[in-house]
Amino acid sequence: MTETATRQHWMAVLARATRGEVDALLQQAGPLPAHEVLKAPETGTVMVEGRAGGAGRRFNLGEATVTRCVVRLESGAMGFSYALGRDARKARLAAITDALLQGEAEAGPLRHGVRTLADKQQAARELASRKAAATKVDFFTLVRGA
């Protein structure tokens, strides 16, 4: 996986995580590092698109509330985050985590924590998929007396 793809992966995991999970992940890495907030957490809306049938034409599904934040550590690493909802603290913690994950020294324990979160999220998706598949109804046409 390329460096960009790796970063996209951990940012997606952090975006899907709860504030408690991000906070616990950071606590494993030690105290919060000194950082400068470049863009304070701010809340806005984004347009969510859907696709007909999952792969067909795009359409505007509606708007979603998103909070974003940008921080810079003393090392110069910049961290970014976007999180659904209005949780400013989660957005700030996720941005700090993103910045730390870019460093060499701090990244080891954090990357392990992100992998654990990703596995937990994947297991939850698979469970939801199995539950949905259990309720699937197949409709078919029965032809009489051909």
Image (spheres, rainbow, N blue to C red):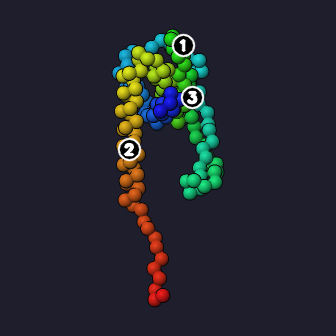
Which sits earlier in the primary sequence, circle 3 or circle 2? 3
Q: Amino acid at mark 2?
A: Ala
The image shows residue 72, relative to residue 140, as above or below, that is above
Q: CA distance from mark 1 to mark 2?
A: 36 Å
**Position of residue 48 measured from the top left corner of the image (x, y, whole percent):** 60, 44
The residue tagged 2 is 124
Secondary structure at numbered mark 1? loop
- State which mark lies toward you, 1 or 2: 1
Q: Along the horizontal axis of the image, is 138 left or right of 83?
A: left
- State which mark lies toward you, 3 or 2: 2
**Position of residue 25 measured from the top left corner of the image (x, y, whole percent):** 38, 25
For this orientation, the residue located farthest to the front is 1
Q: CA distance from mark 3 to mark 1?
A: 19 Å
The image shows residue 117, relative to residue 126, as above or below, that is above
**Position of residue 107 measured from the top left corner of the image (x, y, whole percent):** 41, 21
The residue tagged 3 is 68
- State which mark lies toward you, 3 or 1: 1
Q: Which residue is drawn at the image coordinates 42% and 62% (left, top)?
A: 136
Q: Which image quarter: residue 72? A: top right
- The reply to whether discs 3 and 2 touch (Cβ–Cβ < 8 Å) is no
Q: Amino acid at mark 3?
A: Arg
Q: CA distance from mark 3 to mark 2?
A: 25 Å
Q: Along the horizontal axis of the image, is 106 left or right of 57?
A: left
